[in-house]
C-alpha cells in the first residue's frame, strides 16, 4: 500500500514551520553569496603580490627591450582605447578612418574591400578589442581581430599578405615584394611591443624614464618601465610598459592622460606563449565563394598597417602625423612632448557656429571651443589626448598638448 | 488499492497524459518491490521517475509542436538563402548582415547548422525551454495532479530533480533537433565539404561535424540557466500559463537589458550575455574564454534558481 507522503512541512499552522520554510531560502542566498565572494576575491588572490626580481636600471631595461629577439610567439592581446571621442554610432567609423590617415582619404570614391587591412584596423581607435597574435620568424605572422561570431585575420606568410573578413566572407590579397619589402611593416601595430618601440623613440632629455617596480602580466614576471614627460603642457600623463623579465618582450602598454581617468591606450597580453605556433596557423587559401580583392585593384593604396594609430611617435597617437602626411607644408613646432604639427589645408577652415547660425551652428559650437589670438580665430577640438585647432583661414595645429599650450604655440607660430 | 491510486485512476479519465504519469509512478513504486512503506528508494527508482517524466513530456502534443517549430526554422533559413543567392551572389549582400555565419552557408551546407543555432538561440530555443520548464510544476498544480504525484513516496526533492532533468533533456533534444534539421537542409540545398574556420584556416568535413556537435552541446548547456529559472517560477504559482508567460517575459526582459549600453556593468551577469559565444568554437585555435564564462554563468544560475526552487517547493502547501 502506498502511504501518504509524510512531508515535514504540511503543517502550515505551526509557527515553527514558517521559520523552517524561511530557513530553506538560506541555501539559494548562500549560493549567491559564495558566487559573489568568488567573483570578488579570486582575482584579488590571483593578483597576490608583485614578483621578486633582481634590481635593474632603466637604461639596462631599455637595452633589454632593444636586445629582445622573440621570434616565436602566440598569445592573446586585449587592447582598449578611450580617446574621449564622442560616441557617434555610425559616424564612428568614418571618424575612425579620418584618423586612420591619408590612405583612406585618397581611396574614398573607390569602393574598398571589407577585408582591406587599413580600413579594418581603424576600428581599433575606439573601444575594447581582443586580438590573437602568432609569430614565427620574420616571414610568418598572423593577427586576428576577434569580433562577435566573426573574425578578421591578417596573415603574412612568406610573400603573401592575406586579409580575411569572415563576416562578409571577403578576402584581401597583397604580395609583399611588389612595392614594399616583406617584413615587419606588414605587421599590425597592435601588440604592446609595437607601442613600446614607438614610445622609446621619443626618449630624450624632455622625458624621465624610471623602473617602477615589478608586475605580473599574463602569468609572467615583468618589470614596469615608467616614461613620464618632464615638460608641462602636454596631455600625456605617463606611459607604463611592462617588460617580460626573461625575454625582454614588452607585455603591456598603458598610456594615461595628464587629466587623469582611465587609460587612453591600454594594450596588454592576457595570454602569451613563446613556443612555435602551429604551421597551419599561417596557411590560407581563400574559401570557396569568397570575394577576393587584389591589392593592385585598389588605387592610392598605402602599405597595410602603415596608417594605423600608434604607428607614429607616442606624442602623435592616434595618427596625428598620418593626418598631415597627405597634405603639403607640414611643419613641426616645438620640442619633445609639446611638439605641435601644423599645416595649411588651403581651404576655408571650419566656419564657426555663429557664422553658420541656427541648429547647425549650435552643433558645430558644441563640438569645439571657439578661440582667438594672433593667428586670427578658430575652433579647438579636444579629445582626451589630442587637441586640434582649426583656424578660420584653414590652418590646422594638432598636438598632444593641452588647449592653452596649443593656442600659445599657434600664437608663436 | 490505496485511495490515492484510485483517485489517480479517476483523474486519468480526464487527462490521459496525467494517467500515464500516475500509472508510471505506481509502477515505479511497485517495481522495486519495497512493499510500499520503505523509504530511501534506490537511485534506479529516481531514474524510473525521470524516465516516466520524460516520456510523458515528449508525448504531449505541445512538446511535439514546439519541436516542429524548431525544426522548421533551419528549413526557412535554408530556403531563404537559396532563393536569395539564385543569381550567384553571396548571402547577406556581402555586408555582413543577418545571423552569424550566414554569408558562408552557400559555400558549405554545414554552416547552416551554425546559422540555425545562432538564429534560434536568442529566442526560439529559450522560449521552448520556458514553456516546458514553466509547465513542469505549475502545470501539474493547474491540472490538479500535483498532489497525486506527491502521494506516491517520490519525495518533493526527488520530483523536482526529475522535473529539472526532464527539462534539461528537452534542452538537449531541442538543440539537436535544430542542428539535425539544419544539417539535413544544408546537405540537400548546398554543397558540403572542407570548411574554412572564421580564423581563415581549413578543417576537414569530419572535424567540421565534430565542431557542430560540440557547438550543439554548448548551446544546450547555455539553456540550463533559463531552465532553472523557469522551474523556480513554476514553483511560485499554481497556473501553468502564468509560469510560462513569466518565464518567457523574463527572457525577453533580460535580452532587452542586455542591449542597453548604460547597463554594461550588470550585463556580464545576465544569463543570455554570453550565449552567442559558441561561435568562438569555430575559431582556430579554439577560443574558450567566453565559452567558459558562459558555462560558469549557467552553472551559477542553475545552482541559485535550482536551490530557490527547492526551497520554495519543498516547503510549499500543495493545495491542488
Image (cartoon, coloured by chain):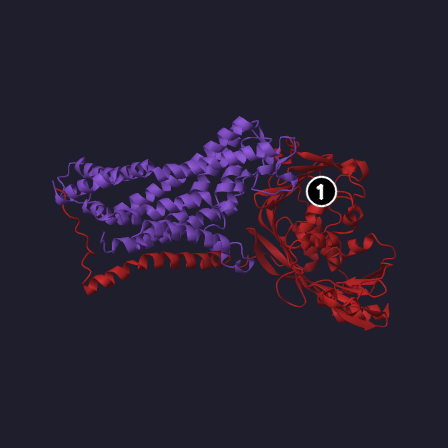
Q: Is residue A405 among what the camera can see?
A: yes
- Quick check: A371 above or below A294? below
Residue ID at (19%, 55%): A8
Q: Disc 1 marks which residue?
A: A116
What secondary structure is marked by label 1?
Answer: loop
Residue A286 in percent (x, y) is at 66, 32
Place residue B90 in its image quadrant.
top right
Place residue A259 in its image quadrant.
bottom right
Q: Given the image, what chain letter belongs to the residue carrying mark 1?
A: A
Output the letter for the chain in purple: B
Residue A345 in percent (x, y) is at 85, 58
Position of the C terminus of chain A, as image quadrant, is bottom right
Residue A204 in percent (x, y) is at 77, 61
Neighbor class of circle 1 (other Cα within 10 Å; few <14, some 14-19, many 20+) is many
- Quick check: B315 above or below A137? below
Which is nearer the eye, B265 or A366? A366
Place residue A288 in its image quadrant.
top right
Q: Is residue A119 left or right of residue B104?
A: right
Output the letter for the chain in red: A
Residue B199 in percent (x, y) is at 60, 38
Q: Is residue A248 among what the camera can see?
A: no
Position of the N terminus of chain A, as image quadrant, is top left
- Quick check: A391 above or below A220? below
Which is nearer the eye, A175 or B226? B226
Judged from this view, the residue extending furthest toward the front is B14
Q: Is residue A124 left or right of residue B309?
A: right
Judged from this view, the residue extending furthest toward the bottom is A373
Amino acid at each position: 500500500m502506498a502511504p501518504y507522503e509524510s512531508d515535514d512541512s504540511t503543517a502550515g499552522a505551526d509557527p515553527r514551520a514558517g521559520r523552517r520554510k524561511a530557513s530553506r531560502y538560506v541555501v539559494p542566498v548562500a549560493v549567491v553569496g559564495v558566487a559573489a565572494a568568488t567573483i570578488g576575491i579570486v582575482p584579488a588572490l590571483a593578483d597576490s603580490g608583485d614578483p621578486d626580481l633582481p634590481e635593474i636600471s632603466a637604461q639596462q631595461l631599455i637595452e633589454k627591450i632593444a636586445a629582445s629577439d622573440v621570434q616565436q610567439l602566440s598569445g592573446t592581446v586585449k587592447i582598449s582605447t578611450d580617446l574621449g571621442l564622442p560616441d557617434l554610432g555610425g559616424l564612428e567609423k568614418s571618424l575612425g578612418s579620418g584618423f586612420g590617415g591619408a590612405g583612406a582619404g585618397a581611396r574614398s570614391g573607390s569602393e574598398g574591400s571589407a577585408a582591406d587591412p587599413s580600413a579594418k584596423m581603424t576600428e581599433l581607435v575606439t573601444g575594447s578589442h581582443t586580438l590573437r597574435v602568432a609569430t614565427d620568424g620574420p616571414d610568418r605572422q598572423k593577427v586576428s581581430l576577434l569580433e562577435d561570431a566573426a573574425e578578421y585575420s591578417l596573415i603574412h606568410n612568406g610573400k603573401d599578405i592575406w586579409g580575411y573578413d569572415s563576416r562578409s566572407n571577403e578576402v584581401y590579397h597583397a604580395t609583399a615584394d611588389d612595392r614594399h619589402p616583406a617584413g615587419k611593416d606588414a605587421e599590425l601595430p597592435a601588440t604592446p611591443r609595437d607601442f613600446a618601440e614607438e614610445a622609446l623613440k621619443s626618449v630624450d632629455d624632455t622625458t624621465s624614464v624610471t623602473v617602477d617596480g615589478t608586475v605580473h602580466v599574463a602569468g609572467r614576471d615583468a618589470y614596469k618601465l615608467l616614461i613620464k614627460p618632464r615638460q608641462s603642457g602636454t596631455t600625456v600623463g605617463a606611459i607604463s610598459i611592462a617588460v617580460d623579465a626573461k625575454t625582454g618582450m614588452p607585455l603591456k602598454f598603458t598610456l594615461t592622460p595628464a587629466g587623469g581617468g582611465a587609460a587612453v591606450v591600454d594594450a596588454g597580453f592576457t595570454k602569451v606563449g613563446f613556443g612555435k605556433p602551429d604551421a597551419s596557423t599561417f596557411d590560407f587559401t581563400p574559401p570557396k565563394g569568397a570575394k577576393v580583392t587584389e591589392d593592385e585593384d585598389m588605387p592610392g593604396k598605402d602599405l597595410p598597417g602603415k596608417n594605423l594609430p600608434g604607428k607614429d611617435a607616442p606624442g602623435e597617437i592616434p595618427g596625428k602625423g598620418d593626418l598631415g602626411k597627405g597634405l603639403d607644408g607640414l611643419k613641426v613646432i616645438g620640442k619633445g612632448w609639446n611638439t605641435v604639427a601644423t599645416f595649411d589645408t588651403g581651404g576655408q577652415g571650419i566656419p564657426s557656429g555663429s557664422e553658420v547660425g541656427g541648429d547647425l551652428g549650435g552643433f558645430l559650437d558644441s563640438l569645439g571651443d571657439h578661440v582667438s589670438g594672433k593667428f586670427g580665430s578658430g575652433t579647438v577640438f579636444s579629445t582626451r589626448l589630442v587637441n586640434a585647432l582649426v583656424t578660420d583661414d584653414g590652418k590646422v595645429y594638432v598636438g598632444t598638448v593641452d588647449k592653452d599650450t596649443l593656442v600659445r604655440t599657434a600664437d608663436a607660430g | 488499492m490505496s485511495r490515492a491510486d484510485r483517485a489517480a485512476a479517476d483523474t486519468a479519465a480526464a487527462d490521459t497524459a496525467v494517467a500515464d504519469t500516475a500509472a508510471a509512478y505506481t509502477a515505479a513504486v511497485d517495481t522495486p518491490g519495497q512493499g510500499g512503506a520503505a523509504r530511501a528508494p534506490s537511485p534506479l527508482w529516481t531514474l524510473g521517475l525521470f524516465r516516466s517524466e520524460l516520456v510523458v513530456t515528449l508525448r504531449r502534443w505541445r512538446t511535439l509542436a514546439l519541436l516542429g517549430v524548431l525544426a522548421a526554422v533551419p528549413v526557412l533559413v535554408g530556403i531563404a538563402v537559396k532563393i536569395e543567392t539564385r543569381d550567384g551572389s553571396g548571402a547577406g549582400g556581402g555586408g555582413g548582415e543577418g545571423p552569424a555565419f550566414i554569408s558562408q552557408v552557400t559555400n558549405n551546407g554545414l554552416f547552416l547548422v551554425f546559422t540555425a543555432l545562432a538564429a534560434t538561440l536568442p529566442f526560439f530555443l529559450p522560449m521552448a525551454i520556458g514553456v516546458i520548464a514553466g509547465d513542469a510544476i505549475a502545470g501539474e498544480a493547474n491540472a490538479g495532479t500535483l498532489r497525486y504525484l506527491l502521494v506516491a513516496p517520490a519525495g518533493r526533492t526527488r520530483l523536482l530533480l526529475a522535473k529539472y532533468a526532464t527539462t534539461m533533456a528537452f534542452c538537449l533534444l531541442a538543440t539537436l533537433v535544430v542542428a539535425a534539421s539544419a544539417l539535413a537542409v544544408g546537405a540537400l540545398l548546398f554543397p558540403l565539404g572542407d570548411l574554412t574556420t572564421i580564423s581563415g584556416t581549413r578543417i576537414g568535413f569530419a572535424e567540421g561535424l565534430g565542431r557542430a556537435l560540440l557547438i550543439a552541446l554548448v548551446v544546450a548547456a547555455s539553456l540550463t540557466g533559463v531552465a532553472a529559472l523557469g522551474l523556480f517560477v513554476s514553483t511560485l504559482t499554481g497556473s501553468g500559463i502564468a509560469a510560462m508567460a513569466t518565464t518567457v517575459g523574463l527572457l525577453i526582459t533580460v535580452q532587452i537589458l542586455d542591449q542597453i549600453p548604460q547597463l554594461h556593468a550588470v550585463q556580464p551577469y545576465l544569463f543570455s550575455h554570453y550565449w552567442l559565444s559558441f561561435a568562438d568554437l569555430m575559431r582556430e585555435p579554439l577560443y574558450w574564454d567566453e565559452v567558459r564564462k558562459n558555462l560558469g554563468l549557467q552553472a551559477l544560475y542553475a545552482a541559485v534558481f535550482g536551490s530557490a526552487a527547492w526551497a520554495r517547493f519543498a516547503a510549499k502547501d500543495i493545495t491542488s
